[in-house]
Image (cartoon, rainbow, N blue to C red):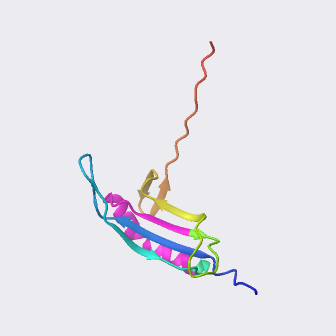
Amino acid sequence: METDKKLKYAVQYAYDGGVHNNFVSMSNVKIITDTNPIPYEEAITLFRGHLDDFKKRYKNDERPQLVIWEDVGDGEFPIYGKELLDLDYRDNLEIRGDKIYKVITKTEEIIIPE
């Protein structure tokens, strides 16, 4: 049986509308999108369609995560393993206008001779 190679992506988008501070942490996760396997073009369109909402929720500290999963198989239930694109509130992100940047810092040990 031949499979359709185009149906191999899945999109997930969720955010946490709960309360998270130094005193209380109560989650209230809202799943906005969770697709079965879809073509690449549809996955990109869905991802782009959520970008403005992601930016708003990131700025409001609502813990959003927006992911395109790659090579998820063609079945009803995607197999998650490899991310094509991942925007995650746990990453150090900067939003400048319409662009999103992931800030990467490099740590290097300074070796002091004995």
- Viewer-closest of 82 and 58: 82
Q: Position of residue 52 (x, y in %)?
A: 40, 69
| Left or right of 13 in this view: 38 | right
Looking at the rendered image, the quarter that the C terminus falls into is top right
| Left or right of 72 in this view: 33 | left
In the rendered picture of this protein, how many numbered marks are placed on residues? 0
Q: Position of residue 12 (x, y in %)?
A: 48, 71
Question: Magenta segment, which residues?
Answer: 42-68
Question: Does the magenta portion include 37?
Answer: no
Q: Position of residue 9 (x, y in %)?
A: 59, 75
Looking at the rendered image, the quarter that the N terminus falls into is bottom right
Question: Does the magenta portion include 57?
Answer: yes
| Residue at x 55%, y 36% (from the top left corner) | 107
| Left or right of 69 in this view: 14 | left
| Residue at x 33%, y 61% (from the top left corner) | 62
| Residue at x 60%, y 18% (from the top left corner) | 112
Above or below for 59 versus 3: above
Q: Position of residue 97 (x, y in %)?
A: 41, 61
Main SS of the magenta segment? helix
User: Which quadrant would residue 43 be assigned to in this image?
Assistant: bottom right
| Residue at x 26%, y 46% (from the top left corner) | 22
